[in-house]
Image (cartoon, rainbow, N blue to C red):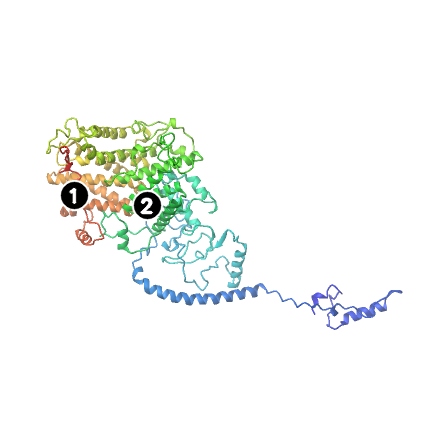
């Protein structure tokens, strides 16, 4: 019998029950009641003891105490841990035997990265408040290398017998108390929205490719169950996105920064939350500006600088993808799937623009070329290349655009900016090859972008107050209220497009006798086969030449100089370089540096030295030149090629007065390319190596060795030429043939070059 069941019958505060039937206490109470009962009161003949009535139900089991429960759980955990340790021991032994030869040259052995950009960018974002950036020592992104950059790689080795759990949240307590604290966290967490990420639960990893991101305060990260699986943790993703907006040149035009950063605070299932492919691309680019993430390893010295297909390099390096490469791959895969399904069509254009810059930055020429072309081709069915009312007059089965109209001014301007960035990227990459462009300028009828401050505020500006891409005086007239450095940058890119189209179509038009490319003083019909055709008198050539010169002098007064003090406007700086590059591209095929009377040679020499002057201006500041963008670096490279041509001519003429100056200018250009390679290691480094190779091919090994630059190794080139998987260095005669004076052939013979 249980004492708890008797307390309602009698007061036994000071008495004890002897478990008799009836108990002695009830007998005494009954005897006392009979002896002192009033007259007329009838009492039962026997005492009524509640202990006589025993419940037939089985006895209730004693509730297990919390201590006993956690002791049992701890025992079970220890048992499971021992089994896991035995399994991991066997797996690690097998893995070490298989991967030891390959991991000894692992590219991520370095735990730090000295690539530290300026902390304030012209985009207006101050990076001092972002922990873990630039120095890698804050409380944001950890500094232990790539080990914490891959949440999808999990560690199979438990730490200190705790299965990866860290109980530092519960100091000065036993393991049992710590386990109770963890259980309390599990009981309080809303399981429908969050869970404990066992990958990032306080693992102190080395530089191996395992583990997850660690949090700032505790080592138990609460992550959204619906968070995209291939992204870093929410906190690190936000840091990389902030790095992207703070340092990347095109970020504040490709997206509306404040709105995008605010959308990151939404739940991942919210329809306004950014698409994961965009976040992957931002993480890939943002990681280039973060010191705690190792950069993509540079190619070996023997790798040809002219190599177009980047996959061949991967077969030589035999390494795993870097963090940036993996994030770019995730972005590309998701964009391709979305395009196949017809989802996120406009966002696919944005992702393609970012990936084009990423591939170009890493010297992956073929992927950059294809990505740039795809971006423009996808933009066409989205209707980004035209603006009402300039649609086709034909009746079609498809609408002018496969995406719905923009709902807000901000959304409309973001679409317009995205198209112009895709256009600029494709045009700028086209200056380095002789291939046709992906979209004709005559098929573009779009408004120019808004001024930067109006774009940020979402101000509506009517088309009557703006300029169209097909305006006749687009390049020489600028509306006072609708001009800034980005608009000039777009206009300068249009110049490159027109020069490229002229060079591409010149032979075809000349063959059919097009009047725009025929000199009035020397027509093809009257030209002798040995007579040099004077292209500078052709109407189309003169029009382009005047347009470029007029554009250079038409800049508004407040946009004349891209450098004010220590501040540099990267868009304005590039817009100032492009007219000089346009003159080089227009005149170089017809220039003869060895002849003092050649007008084309004089023009390209002046243009090249104007680019060098702008390089001297930016070198006098503390600005990080890697933040300028890749097209500025390409302009530097092209000016170096021109100066090398004149250096070769000066050596042939034994001109001691010109050789030292040309030599100093070439060495300075090369030093600036090396400076840019300190941050963005691959593309500037490839340009610098191509400049060295061109110098060697033009002046010879002896003269190249006399310059204060690294020696060009002919042995490496020979070894690669023996490999069928590598691209050989171009022959000197073929490389310089494109710069020979064009000769007009007799009709109908095909034009030839000398």
Whether residue 15 sits left or right of residue 172 in the image: it is: right
Quarter of the image that includes the N terminus: bottom right
What percent of the width, then of the height, locates residue 78? Answer: 48, 66
Q: Which residue is mark 1?
A: 734
Q: Would you say the residues marked 2 and 1 are in contact, meaning their CB atoms lie under 8 Å apart? A: no
- Badge 2 crowding class, 10 Å Cα cut-off, few under 14, some 14 to 19, many 20 or more, is many
The circle drawn on residue 512 is: none
Q: Earlier in the sequence, mark 2 or mark 1?
A: 2
- Any part of residue 193 in sight: yes
- Any part of residue 565 in sight: no
| Residue 86, above or below 526 | below
| Residue 475, above or below 325 | above
* Residue 410 quadrant: top left
Q: Which residue is mark 2?
A: 358
Q: Which one is in front in this view, the residue at disc 2 or the one at disc 1?
A: 1
Q: How many marks?
A: 2
584 or 560: nearer the viewer: 584
| Residue 386, above or below 718 | above
């Amino acid at each position: 019998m249980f004492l708890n069941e008797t307390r309602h019958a009698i007061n036994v505060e000071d008495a004890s029950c002897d478990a008799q039937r009836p108990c002695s206490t009830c007998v005494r109470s009954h005897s006392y009641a009979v002896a002192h009962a009033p007259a007329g009161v009838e009492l039962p003949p026997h005492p009524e003891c509640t202990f006589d009535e025993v419940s037939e139900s089985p006895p209730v089991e004693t509730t297990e105490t919390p201590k006993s429960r956690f002791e049992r759980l701890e025992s079970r955990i220890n048992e499971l841990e021992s089994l896991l340790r035995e399994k991991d021991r066997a797996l690690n032994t097998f893995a070490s035997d298989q991967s030891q030869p390959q991991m000894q040259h692992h590219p991520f052995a370095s735990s730090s990265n000295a690539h530290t950009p300026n902390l304030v960018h012209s985009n207006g974002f101050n990076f001092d408040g972002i922990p873990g950036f630039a120095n890698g020592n804050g409380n944001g992104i950890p500094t232990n290398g790539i080990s914490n950059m891959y949440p999808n790689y999990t560690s199979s080795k438990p730490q200190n017998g705790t299965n990866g759990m860290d109980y530092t949240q519960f100091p000065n307590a036993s393991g049992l108390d710590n386990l109770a604290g963890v259980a309390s966290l599990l009981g309080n967490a809303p399981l429908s929205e969050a869970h404990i990420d066992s990958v990032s639960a306080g693992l102190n990893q080395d530089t191996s490719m395992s583990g997850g991101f660690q949090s700032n305060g505790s080592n138990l990260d609460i992550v959204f169950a619906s968070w995209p699986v291939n992204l870093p943790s929410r906190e690190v993703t936000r840091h990389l996105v902030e790095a992207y907006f703070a340092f990347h040149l095109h970020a504040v035009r490709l997206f509306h920064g404040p709105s995008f950063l605010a959308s990151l605070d939404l739940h991942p299932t919210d329809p306004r939350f950014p698409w994961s492919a965009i976040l992957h691309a931002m993480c890939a680019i943002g990681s280039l500006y973060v010191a705690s993430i190792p950069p993509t390893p540079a190619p070996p010295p023997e790798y040809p600088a002219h190599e177009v297909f980047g996959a061949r390099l991967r077969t030589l390096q035999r390494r795993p993808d870097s963090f940036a490469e993996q994030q770019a791959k995730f972005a590309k895969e998701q964009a391709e799937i979305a395009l196949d399904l017809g989802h996120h069509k406009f966002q696919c254009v944005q992702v393609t623009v970012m990936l084009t810059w990423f591939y170009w930055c890493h010297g992956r020429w073929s992927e950059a070329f294809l990505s740039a072309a795809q971006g423009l081709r996808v933009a066409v069915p989205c209707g980004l290349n035209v603006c009402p009312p300039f649609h086709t007059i034909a009746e079609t089965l498809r609408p002018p655009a496969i995406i719905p109209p923009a709902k807000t001014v901000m959304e409309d301007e973001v679409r317009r900016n995205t198209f112009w960035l895709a256009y600029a990227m494709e045009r700028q990459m086209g200056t380095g090859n002789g291939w046709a462009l992906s979209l004709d300028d005559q098929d573009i009828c779009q408004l120019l972008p808004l001024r930067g401050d109006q774009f940020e505020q979402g101000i509506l500006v009517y088309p009557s107050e703006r300029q169209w891409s097909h305006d006749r005086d687009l390049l020489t007239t600028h509306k006072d209220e609708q001009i800034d450095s980005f608009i000039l940058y777009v206009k300068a890119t249009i110049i490159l497009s027109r020069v490229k189209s002229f060079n591409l179509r010149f032979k075809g038009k000349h063959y059919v006798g097009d009047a725009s490319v025929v000199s009035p003083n020397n027509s093809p019909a009257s030209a002798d086969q040995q007579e040099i055709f004077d292209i500078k008198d052709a109407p189309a050539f003169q029009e382009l030449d005047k347009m470029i010169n007029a554009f250079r002098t038409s800049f508004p007064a407040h946009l004349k100089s891209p450098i004010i003090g220590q501040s540099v406007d990267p868009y304005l700086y590039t817009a100032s370089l492009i007219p000089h590059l346009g003159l080089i591209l227009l005149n170089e095929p017809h220039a003869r540096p060895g002849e003092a009377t050649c007008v084309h040679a004089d023009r390209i020499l002046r243009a090249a030295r104007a680019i060098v002057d702008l390089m001297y201006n930016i070198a006098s500041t503390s600005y990080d030149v890697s933040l300028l963008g890749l097209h500025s670096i390409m302009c530097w490279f092209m000016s170096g090629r021109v100066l090398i041509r004149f250096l070769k001519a000066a050596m042939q003429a034994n001109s001691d007065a010109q050789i030292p100056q040309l030599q100093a200018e070439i060495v300075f250009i090369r030093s600036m390319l090396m400076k840019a390679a300190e941050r963005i290691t691959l593309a500037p480094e490839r340009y610098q190596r191509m400049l060295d190779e061109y110098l060697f091919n033009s002046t010879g090994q002896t003269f190249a060795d006399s310059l204060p630059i690294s020696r060009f190794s002919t042995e490496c080139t020979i070894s690669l030429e023996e490999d069928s998987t590598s691209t050989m260095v171009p022959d000197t005669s073929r490389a310089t043939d494109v710069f020979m004076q064009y000769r007009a052939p007799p009709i109908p013979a095909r034009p030839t070059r000398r």
